[in-house]
Structures are given as structure tokens and as C-alpha cells.
Image (cartoon, rainbow, N blue to C red):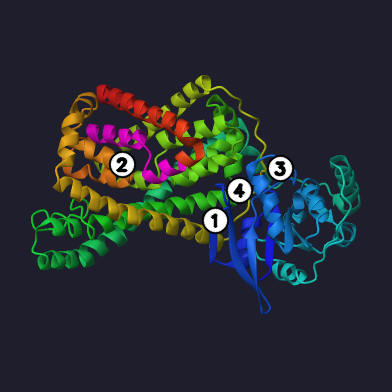
Amino acid sequence: MRTILLVGNPNVGKSVLFSRLTGVRTTVSNYPGTTISYTRGFTKLGDEKLEVIDVPGTYTLEPNSEAEEIALKMLKKGDVIINVINAVNLERSLYLTLQLLERDTPVVVALNMWDDTKHRGIDIDLEKLRTMLGVPVVPTVAVTGEGIKELMESVPGATSPSGPTRSRDERWVAIGEIIEQVQHIRHRHHTWLERLQDASVKPFTGGSIAIAILVLSFFVVRFIGESLIGYLFEPLFNGLWAPVVLRVSSLMGGSGFLHDIVVGKLIGGEVNFVESFGLITSGLYVPFAMVLPYIFSFYLVLGFLEDVGYLPRLAVLMDTIMHWLGLHGYAIIPTLLGLGCNVPAVLSTRILESKRERFIASTLVSIAVPCAALQAMIFGLVGERGGQYVVIIYGTLFAVWVILGIILNHSIKGFSPELLIEIPPYRIPPWKIVVQKMWMRIYGFLAEAIPIILGAIVIINMLYFFGVFDIISDITAPVVSGLLGLPKEAITSLVIGFLRKDVALGMLAPLSLTAKQLVVASVVLAMFFPCIATFVVLLRELGVVNMCKAAGIMIAAALVTGGLLNLIL
């Protein structure tokens, strides 16, 4: 089976083209020995089945980062290279193209975003470009599918030009000659969309747009999540699943060790899906009815913002602020990913150029950026006491993110490089692509979360049965009750937070906490220690020594912040 490699600069539409070619049956893998991921799938060309790999984006085959090193290594595995380039930024994209043409692998050039050339007054002589490069050049519009058929029909006839090996300066001279002969730019007036693009990166207008988008995203996520819970999942569980649970409980005798693990504790003979804490009650209700609706809405909004082209502009806009924290603007991307899940957020810190930046970004994400699952529980458990308490939680975490970042920036030696990032034009993404990406993320969440939640419920019930939590509660009572103002039983949630923070917060419901105690507990739980999945990734990314440093910072920051909140509130 032949392998096609999609190779190109970041943000040129490779992922959209990949989705067009392979559909939904794709897998994401880490390159051996690294955390750099790539996506692979399959397509058919006539009767032949082809493997398609979306290679990590790279600007050059002279690697300056680990992702570019992996891209270079993966080129050895391809039978055909489809070089995806941005037709609007032809001059910048051609440097990688010329490097690819110096190799022995057949190349086809996909001149993507072809529709934007007309909008921007750019005329490209395709025939002359094909002649000068010596390979097929096919104009494509990945978001609409235009040119995809012609692109794939060019693959069988692709040959290796094996051009002369040039120096860096010789390549740029060649690029200048190509651009002079094949590209002509006409004068035209800016469209309203281009004016919006410019406004998105200017401090005042960009800040206003960013605030508006983030506030709107917050309300959209909450509206969709609460609607799914209220109109779909709660009726399903209360109307259809609760009778099944009661029947299982009756068959198991209504009590006992095994009954408490499978069904949980029935309250007044009725099923309370949050407080029962059994495998078929809380074990199913928490991930599906409390967390999944918000995961769905968050990834829907995040996917749209990614594909429409807003997130790179937010990175440019945030660059100055992020420098205060010892980071550059692109670190806002891991931060936003952390609002979905801390695991991919920590993995994505690989885009940052120094170990210092990766340590600061990973620590801040783990401490002050609650994942979507935890946010779902905050909305559900704390939000019912009043929206102002949710605002206090988020305001506190944001303050910690800023203050702790400034402290780390001044206490950790190193440098923060300038931001180099490709900014794509605004485009309306195809909903099929957005939904496909959302489904892959949701599936990953469920595959990871459900086994952990069910396992945690079994372990917790066993620890309760053997009285382990009573011992831990008595030992930690001076800190939990004295410093944080919480009942000593709340230590159970803090311990379980290591397994799954959303489950841990749900365990606070039976303790009848006041609104103030819920705020303190939510903040401390968010900051205290990462869940086990994030812990494993942090250990792999930072190493044992730096992981221990980060853990010490987390515990200290959580106790200090929780103590101050207890005093203030």
C-alpha cells in the first residue's frame, strides 16, 4: 500500500484537505519517542487503497524545532508528497517546495486557498508555474472540495524532479525569479472581512473583539450545555434509567457491599444519580449527563474558533501580556486547550521553544485552567447557588494565573523568544469538518474518562468500607477545617481529585456545603493537584525533578489561595 504525505507550512489547510481525503476514519498517533502527534487515515484512488498522513506543519527541512525534526524524518516513509501551499502567500510557501523538489520522492503541489487569490487581486499563471517547478500544480479550495478530484488524479503520474541542491540564498533567488514570472498583483480595495482581520490584532479593537468573543463563547457553551442537560439527559435518566436502577437494587437485596458498588446508596428509597455513587448511577450520570453536554458545547465552539482563523490572531493580540508571564503569545493556545482538557494542553506546550516556557505554561495550565469536565461540575453544582459564585471562582483562578505567572517569570532563569506565527485569513469552516473534529475529541474524552470514573467509584467505595477516609480526615482536619473552613470529610474529594476532578467536585454535593464553602472547595480542587492523566503527561514532559517542583507550587498555591478566600468570604 502506497503512502501519501501531506506536507506544508502550518495553517495552509492541510488538516482540512486531509479530512476531505480520508473522511472520519482517522487515527492520531505520537511519533515514536516523542509527544509530537500526526494524523493518518486512508483513501481510495480507483481500486487502490492509499494511506494518507498529515505531517506536522513545517516551514523548512532545516529543522528549528522538534516538530520540524519529526516532519523531516517522516518524509523518508512517503511514496508521494502532496505539498500543500497557501496560494495567497506563494513566495513564503515556495521555500519548502524547492527543498522538497531536491529530494527523490515524487511531488504534487496543491495550490490551496485558490479562491482567496481572486478576492485579493492576485493572478497566478498556473502553466508557467508548473513548467518552472517541473511537477503537477493543482489549484484547490479544501473547505469546499474544489480541485480535490483533480489533485488525486495527478498522484499516479507524479514523478520526482530531483532538482539541483541549492544553498539557502540560491533558493530565495530562485523564488524571486518564479514570483516575478508567475504572479501579478492588482490594486483593489479591502473588503469588510479584511478590515475585521486587521482590527482583530490591534490592541484596542482587538481587545474589545476578544472580550466579546470570549463572553459570547461562555454563554453559548453554558446555554447549549444546560439545554442538553435539562431537555435531554435528565429526562432520559430520571424517566427511563431510574426504574432500571431500582429494579437492579431490588434484585440485589437493597443493601450490602456489592450493592453499594454497583448501585450505590439509595436516599429515601429513591435514586439520586449524583449522591448515590454507584457504577450504574453516578458512574454513568456524571460523565454522560453532567459532563458530556458541556464537553460537546465547548469543543463545538473551540473547533469553530480554530477553523475560522481567530485563535492565531488571539495569540498575536496576547503576545505582550503573555511576555509578563515569561511566555509568548502562542502560549494562549495551550491555555485555551486546557479549558477543554489539561492533557492536550500540556502536550501542546511542545510548540513553545524553551524548557523554561514549557515549565511555566504547563504549571499555569495545571493550576489555574479548569478543564471542561470540572467546569461542567462548577456550573452544575455552584451555579445553582447563583452566577456570582461562578464568577468569583473564575476571577480567582484568573488572578492566580496572572500573579503566579509573574512570580515564575521573575524567579525562573531563561528567555522568552519573539512570536513567529502564520495568520490565516478568516474563513467560514465547513460544519462537517468542525463536527468531525468535535466528535474525535469527545470520543477521546469518553474513552479516557469512563474507565477512570468507574474505577474511581470502585476504589472509593472500598476505601469507605475499610474506613481509610476516616483516618485521612482526622489527620488533615487542622488544614481542611482550620485553614480552608471546610468540613473534614471534604478531604475525600481532594484525594479523589487525583483520579478525576469532576467526580471529586461531585462528591461535595452530599456534604451540604454553604455557597462560600463550595467556592473555596472548587478553587482549591482546581488548583490542588492535576488529575492522574495530566500527572502522567507532566511527568513525561517535565521530568521527575521539574514535576516535583510543579507539584510543590500547586499545593502551596492552592493552600494559600484557599486560605485567603476563606478569610475574605
Does the magenta-highlighted stretch encompass residue 534?
yes
Which comes before the other along the chain, label 4 or label 2? 4
Quadrant containing the N terminus in the rendered view: bottom right
Per the image, the residue denoted by label 1 is: 29
Position of the C terminus by quadrant:
top left
Disc 3 designates what residue?
63
Q: CA distance from mark 3 to mark 2?
A: 40 Å
N-term-proximal mark, 3 vs 1: 1
Q: Is residue 187 visible?
A: yes
Q: Which comes sooner in the sequence, label 1 or label 2?
A: 1
* Amino acid beneath label 1: Ser
Residue visible at 22% across and 42% down?
Answer: 508
Front: mark 4 or 2 = 2
Pointer 3 with pointer 1, Cβ within 8 A: no
Observer-nearest of 190 and 414: 414
How far is disc 3 from disc 1 in space, using C-alphas? 21 Å
Q: CA distance from mark 4 to mark 1?
A: 25 Å
Q: Which residue is mark 2?
A: 497
Residue 496, compared with residue 45, is above or below; it is: above
Q: Is residue 333 left or right of residue 448?
A: right
Q: Is residue 11 visible?
A: no
Q: Nearer the viewer, mark 3 or mark 2?
A: 3
Disc on the earlier residue, 4 or 1: 1
- Residue at disc 1, secondary structure: strand
